[in-house]
Image (cartoon, rainbow, N blue to C red):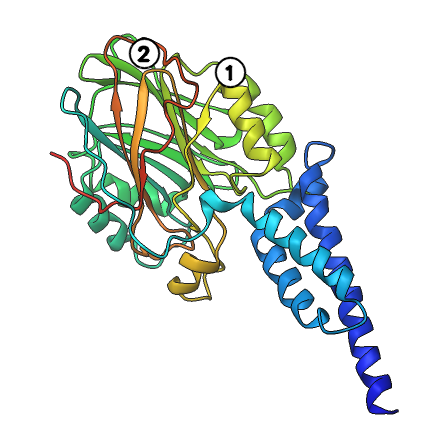
């Protein structure tokens, strides 16, 4: 085989790879048609980068026009994920409201068999959040969380049928008088109405299954009623196993009348890979939603605690007049990746 023939064969194989990757990338935009398409959406950033890497050398081949089109398509797709891309420099600080209390919520997927549970308890002690939403609460975590009962006496643990993937909600602030916390089907969601300085706020912890062909799509349908039943002012956090731009996350937000907080950045990667890769090449699948008289002020990814997810600390304020915001995006994130500050 001559050098020219070999070069043409390599270019042809690269063109086929670029076409296949572009097709997968395109499929992710049709997640509302079928959950199978939505599964491709979760890897939009990675597929965009791969398409670009394959297309660049093809610009010097006979496939240059196709490569240029694919490169532009990849850049356009990457732009749709801009709010969730890793931040390479700190965001400017945003002044906290002087007329309202600032509260904090810590979202963590604990991992059911976490080998370092004391790291989790240490992080909770140092950040001192007002409320904590937890996923993958297994039997071992029931014992570990018992050690902080005095600090977080208001709580609800919702077990999963297999004993590994339940959710929990812990609070330093009391549940609203006359309300009862509740667990939703199969331990996928816990909800409690919490008194924040005289204002009642529905707080929910949610944990969705993996995307299609797993049961995520059907599970969201099961949670339609409790999502729609969230109060006028609410905040919900959890491991959605879905990225912010996916049809799954948009569906959850629509069912609950919620606004999705701009992503804190990638939070998950396979636990055998280093924490550095999780922060810059992982998937942003831990989400926070809110609505009503609640404004999210900041979001910070914290250090590794032995799980395959990074914890996310969110600061927010609550309007006491219960007046609905005129702007539907009033609960959007004001600043991201600000330094976490403990609250008393």
Quick one: SS at disc 2?
loop
x then y, percent, for residue 89: 32, 55
Which residue is located at x 45 percent, y 25 percent? 259
Identify residue for label 2. 179
Mark on residue 228?
1
| Depicted 75 relative to depicted 199: above or below | below
| Depicted 164 relative to depicted 322: above or below | below
Which residue is located at x 41 percent, y 17 percent? 327
x then y, percent, for residue 318: 26, 20
x then y, percent, for residue 263: 42, 41
Q: Decide if residue 196 is on the left or right side of residue 268.
A: left
- The answer to which quarter of the image holds residue 63 is bottom right
Which residue is located at x 64 percent, y 38 percent? 215
Question: How many numbered callouts?
Answer: 2
Quick one: SS at disc 1?
helix
Q: Quadrant of the C terminus?
A: top left
Q: Is residue 314 visible?
A: yes
């Amino acid at each position: 085989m001559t050098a020219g023939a070999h070069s043409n064969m390599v270019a042809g194989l690269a063109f086929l790879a670029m076409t296949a990757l572009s097709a997968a990338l395109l499929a992710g935009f049709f997640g509302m048609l079928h959950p199978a398409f939505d599964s491709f959406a979760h890897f939009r950033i990675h597929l965009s980068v791969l398409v670009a890497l394959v297309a660049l050398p093809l610009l010097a081949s006979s496939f240059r026009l196709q490569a240029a089109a694919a490169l532009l398509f990849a850049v356009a797709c990457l732009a749709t994920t801009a709010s969730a891309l890793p931040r390479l420099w700190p965001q400017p600080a945003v002044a906290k409201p002087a007329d309202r209390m600032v509260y904090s919520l810590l979202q963590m997927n604990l991992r059911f068999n976490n080998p370092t549970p004391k790291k989790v308890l240490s992080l909770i002690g140092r950040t001192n959040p007002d409320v904590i939403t937890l996923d993958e609460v297994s039997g071992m975590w029931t014992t570990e969380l018992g050690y902080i009962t005095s600090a977080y006496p208001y709580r609800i643990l919702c077990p999963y049928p297999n004993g590994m993937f339940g959710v929990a909600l812990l609070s330093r602030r009391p549940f609203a008088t006359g309300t009862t916390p509740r667990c939703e089907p199969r331990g996928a969601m816990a909800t409690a109405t919490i008194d924040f300085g005289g204002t009642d706020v529905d707080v929910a912890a949610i944990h969705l299954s993996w995307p299609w062909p797993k049961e995520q799509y059907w599970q969201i349908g099961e949670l339609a009623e409790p999502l729609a039943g969230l109060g006028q002012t609410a905040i919900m956090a959890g491991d959605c196993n879905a990225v912010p731009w996916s049809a799954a996350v948009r569906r959850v937000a629509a069912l609950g009348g919620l606004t999705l907080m701009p992503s804190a950045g990638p939070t998950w990667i396979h636990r055998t890979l280093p924490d550095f890769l999780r922060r810059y090449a992982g998937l942003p699948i831990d989400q926070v939603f809110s609505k009503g008289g609640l404004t999210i002020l900041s979001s910070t990814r914290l250090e590794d605690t032995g799980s395959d997810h990074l914890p996310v600390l969110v600061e927010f304020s609550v309007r006491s007049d219960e007046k609905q915001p005129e702007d539907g995006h009033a609960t959007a994130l004001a600043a991201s990746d600000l330094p976490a500050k403990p609250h008393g």
